[in-house]
Image: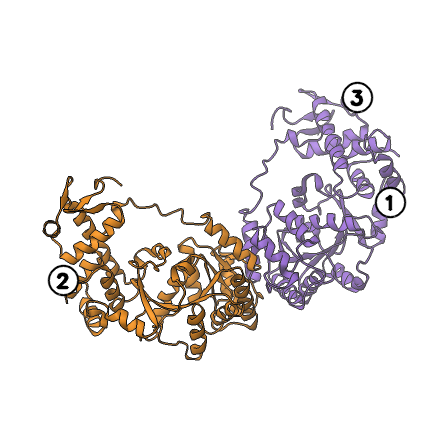
Chain colours: A purple, B orange
């Protein structure tokens, strides 16, 4: 295959790599997604599972350069969104190396705009009638306050939250573990269709991807990352819901848990999280709004992570292109590819990032430095 | 009336002063209870409500020096305990100026020993069936672990806690707001009799004292002070139960609250306290035991209050007697009363405290300093 641009590379990785694969993330951090993909397809990625990823990629329409994957998504009533697209929710950057390469999105709304004002309402599939009532009522109350209610589309608390938001005439987003064209659970086919009609259905799994256990777990980090706060209505002691809450907690997003009868196993996880200060007790939707307002105001935004210097944030391919730039004057495309000693597509992808970041700017002769590489 | 000894003075104050009367506490802190009482009866207390207290005292058998009050308590199947008695629970000192002068106690058990290993289980009168079940079950579980369950004998949570402890064959203590011979509520006459049979009924109100609203509120501080930890099973947002929890919190005793359905008004106070970190969420009796173990180990004992120097802890009468002691040799009773310029009974009461604290010791000629007043 010929070398793709950055967007095609991201879509290709989304087709072949498991979500949050740490080895793939390392490779892409080092070389950038374009050059890393080139190394994968040329067999020089160094990944032990490189051949398996190659085979998966070859079997997908993403191996065809261009818009085959986009065309197929469009045919399924969906679209692919990557970080090169305006619709990409910037807060996914909080996932760091665990950010998805791409999201498949079905629905008319704009994912980035909804995510800016969304709250996760999650909980157990094996929930109580009490839990369903709380999820439905609180989702409706938050939807009425123009908060987008995001959940996972599962039986129990998730479905009650989606339905509560819809009943209030609000917007709701469902993040699936499988492809957006795979209705799961099957019994929620009509619910998912309605969510896509009035809000969005999204997934990092390619079209047709069946649901697997591992995908449920990795999906939970997206629910946490796409929202401003997570409300756990009911959760057993060890559960995927707790994993979602932990992911939100790790990103310094507020986690709220609803108390319930002390004997109820469906509330045990909520009580444990409150006890261990992994969640604060929520008594009413207003408590959630108060936490969201704080989060919006930045009071609860990450304080631990130090912003990297701009140059540190560049991948190796981008740094190599940057270092190949002359300190004075401009450089033409051919000379730059030769100086960077990278495939042309990797250089173009790197230039797009460097231009976006204010490092280089195009001129009549090609590109020139906009500021010195030593500057931050 | 002739000047009483310390114990008689404490009993007299218990008969005439409202619990935790700050003006009376100030007077007694300044002069010691004996001299303060002398000032009350001689009309020189400076208390605006001095005449009213005098009248109440005159109407009581505590105005008669000697054992009239004790005799009447004994006739009612009770006894009076003051800080001069071995049965006095030392932890009441955590109340500072709000400590009671005396307690009337009915029952065969030893209040001091029970208080050393007791836990308060308190809550709303207007409780739910859920709350009653939790109170009964947790009281039984704690009683089986040899914890004495202390509560206030009221309808609802209190009664369920007492009954749970009794059903488990455990010991329970009821602290009443009125006299120990006044069954309140009336419907609990048999329950209170059984508690006195198998545990203790106690009160700082004199015999025959009817129940008044103010006495309920002041009673709550005793429940907090007499126990190692307080468990709130159900409580409305503003309630006497919350006052008990606050008093326990102020003395750095663990406060635990049981969660319940988020819509239940009977759980609203518990949820609010957990949210505001005035209580920790308790999921089971083992959580209570863990908090009690920590408290016993001293991990949760007061860290803010600085222990006063020993001399600072003395009242003015005691300091005056101490300052009247010769630095070398001993002093006889007559010379000491003259040097201290205090009534003889005040001097004897002060000497008992000073001897107990290791300041003075009796010898053949009277008393001598055991260490210099400048020493701590």
CA distance separating discs 3 and 1: 31 Å
Say what secondary structure mark 3 lies in: helix
Q: Is residue B104 visible?
A: yes
Q: Residues within 10 Å of mark 3 (few under 14, many from 20)?
A: few
Q: Which residue is at 67% across, 42% downward?
A: A93
Residue A138 image position (x, y, % from top left):
62, 63
Q: Residues within 10 Å of mark 1 (few under 14, many from 20)?
A: some
Q: Is residue B314 visible?
A: no
Residue B184 image position (x, y, % from top left):
40, 76
In the rendered view, would you say B129 is above or below A244? below
Q: Find disc 1 in the rendering and name its residue.
A: A68
Quadrant position of the C terminus of chain A in the picture: top right
Say what secondary structure mark 1 lies in: helix
Residue A122 image position (x, y, % from top left):
67, 57
Chain ID of residue with mark 2: B
Cβ–Cβ below 8 Å for labels 3 and 1? no
Q: Find disc 2 in the rendering and name its residue.
A: B44
**Direction from residue A124 to residue A44 in the image, left or right:** right
Q: Which residue is at 55% across, 53% downward?
A: A293
CA distance separating discs 2 and 1: 101 Å
Name the mark on residue A292.
Answer: none
**How many tags in the picture?**
3
In the rendered view, would you say B339 is above or below B4? above
Quarter location, residue B180 = bottom left
Q: Find disc 3 in the rendering and name its residue.
A: A338
**Mark 3 or 1, nearer chain start:** 1
**Direction from residue B60 to residue A303 in the image, left or right:** right
Say what secondary structure mark 2 lies in: loop
Chain ID of residue with mark 1: A
Quadrant position of the N terminus of chain A in the picture: top right
Cβ–Cβ below 8 Å for labels 2 and 1? no
Chain ID of residue with mark 3: A
């Amino acid at each position: 295959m010929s070398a793709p641009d950055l967007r095609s590379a991201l879509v290709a990785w989304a087709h072949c790599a498991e979500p949050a694969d740490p080895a793939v993330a390392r490779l892409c951090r080092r070389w950038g997604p374009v050059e890393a993909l080139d190394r994968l397809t040329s067999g020089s990625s160094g990944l032990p599972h490189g051949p398996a990823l190659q085979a998966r990629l070859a079997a997908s329409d993403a191996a065809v350069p261009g818009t085959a994957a986009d065309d197929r998504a469009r045919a399924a009533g969906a679209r692919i969104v990557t970080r090169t697209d305006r619709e990409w929710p910037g807060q996914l950057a909080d996932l760091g190396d665990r950010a998805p390469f791409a999201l498949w999105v079905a629905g008319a709304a704009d994912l980035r705009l909804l995510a800016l004002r969304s709250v996760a309402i999650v909980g157990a599939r094996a929930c109580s009638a009490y839990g369903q009532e709380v999820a439905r009522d609180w989702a409706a109350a938050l939807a009425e306050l123009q908060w987008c209610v995001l959940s996972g589309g599962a039986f129990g608390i998730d479905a009650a939250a989606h339905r509560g938001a819809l009943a209030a005439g609000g917007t709701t987003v469902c993040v699936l573990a499988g492809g957006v064209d795979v209705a799961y659970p099957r019994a929620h086919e009509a619910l998912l269709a309605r969510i896509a009609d009035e809000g969005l259905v999204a997934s990092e799994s390619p079209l047709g991807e069946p649901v697997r256990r591992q995908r449920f777990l990795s999906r939970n980090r997206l629910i946490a990352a796409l929202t401003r706060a997570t409300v756990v209505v009911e959760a057993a002691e060890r559960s995927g819901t707790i994993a979602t809450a932990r992911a939100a907690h790790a990103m310094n997003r507020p986690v709220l848990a609803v108390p319930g009868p002390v004997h109820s196993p469906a509330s045990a996880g909520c009580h444990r999280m409150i006890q261990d200060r992994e969640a604060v007790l929520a008594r009413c939707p207003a408590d959630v709004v108060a936490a969201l307002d704080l989060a919006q105001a930045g009071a609860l935004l990450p304080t631990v992570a130090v912003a990297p210097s701009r140059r540190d944030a560049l991948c190796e391919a981008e740094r190599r292109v940057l270092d190949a730039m002359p300190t004075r004057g401009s450089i033409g495309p051919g000379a730059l590819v030769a100086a960077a000693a990278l495939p042309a597509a990797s250089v173009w992808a790197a230039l797009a990032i460097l231009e976006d970041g204010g490092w280089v700017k195009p001129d009549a002769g090609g590109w020139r430095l906009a500021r010195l590489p030593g500057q931050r």
